[in-house]
Image (cartoon, grey):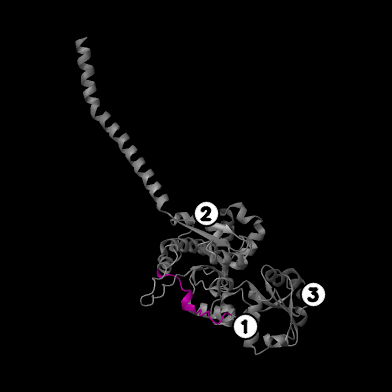
Amino acid sequence: MVRTRLLLAAAARRDEPARRRRAATRLGRTIIGLLLLASLAGRSADAAALTVAIGGPAEDPAYLPVHAAAALETFRAEGVEVTLRRVKHATAAATALRQREADLAVTALDQAIQGVAARDVPIRLVVAHTRAPAVALVVSPAVRDAVHGVADLRGRTVGIPGPGTTGHLLLLALLRQARVEPWQLDLRSLGGAALAGRVASGELPAAILEEPWASRILEAGRGVALVDFRRPEETARVLGGPFYEIVTVGRRVLPPPRPRRGGPAPPPPPEEPPDAALAAFARAVVRVQAWLATAPVAAIADRLPPDLVRDRARFAARLAAARDAYAADGDATLAGLTATLRVLRLGTPWPVSLKLGPDDLLPPPAVAAARRDLGWPPPPP
């Protein structure tokens, strides 16, 4: 009996180091788990948050990058919590930004200018989504032999999607270049389907067609593109630079004016999102935008959730037609902003008090640097 106790004690002494190692391992795992939880909790508490008003559906390729970045959690991966506030149209997105119901607006640049900047709320561009508008000046086959350039439209009926639309402004720019006055044309404003049908039938000699009608008419051979703005190289050739139609903009905080001597101190400027949050947003969108512009369309459709793809064939056709127009790096050049503002000024007159130049729209340096630091190609989402 004594011998048995001695043998058990000896065995216990031999197992003691192993037990200590196992206990230390369990303790180490517990500590690591607690540290990880603390880290995640701290990261969640410190994560910047942005409310983004988006003025277009995911079916529109120009707005798809932001919808996709939210669905793929690319915003969260870059360290920013984004809440998308879906509104009916680009005008409503600009209004939400002006009224401080959103930190950023994904909208048409002309709406941002008319609805925000022109109402004494300075803006700055955070991400450029498209560098070419999704429109083309299409001529009916019935008059193709007689219409070789924009000047040949003088005296003819030309359709537009609506007064003040991007297509209308681009037509005005083309007429100015060709030294044709707008009153020398008979302009007709119609919906996209009606415009496409009347061009195809020959009832309209020419029209500015938006997507997807431009692609449908041209691919069916029922019209000829006189100027195809969907192609970035043609847009740059005609306008002198890229045309930034859909962009993400935020408010630009100006320094308060100096108080008059002996007067009250000016109120502090309103609090705006930190540059780090804007940089994280921009990085996420650029990663998705570059992926949409370069990855196989089938692979993109496989990766995105069904509610963003829906009809797979239609999704593939729309994306294939628009992907060349993405500003893949999200940047807006001074030449492009100059060209874009030149066209937009042809629309509704800007207030005399609005002093807006290309330099005024440039993003904060931290945002531009964050986009550049991604390199090319940037990491996929």
Label 2: element kind: loop
Q: Which residue is mark 3?
A: 201
Q: Residue at x 57, y 58 (%)?
A: 85
Q: Which one is closest to the eye, mark 2 or mark 3?
A: 2
Numbered range of the magenta stretch: 350-365
Q: Which residue is mark 2?
A: 72
Residue 355: within the magenta?
Answer: yes
Q: Residue at x 62, y 76 (%)?
A: 229
Q: Residue furthest front?
A: 262
Q: Residues within 10 Å of mark 2 (few under 14, many from 20)?
A: some
Of pointers 2 and 3, the one earlier in the residue sequence: 2
Residue 90: x and y in percent read 60, 66
Q: CA distance from mark 2 to mark 3?
A: 44 Å
- Please, what is the three-letter code of the amino acid marked with disc 3? Ser
- Please, what is the three-letter code of the amino acid marked with disc 2? Leu
- Please, what is the three-letter code of the amino acid marked with disc 1? Ala
Of pointers 1 and 2, the one earlier in the residue sequence: 2
* Tag of residue 173: 1
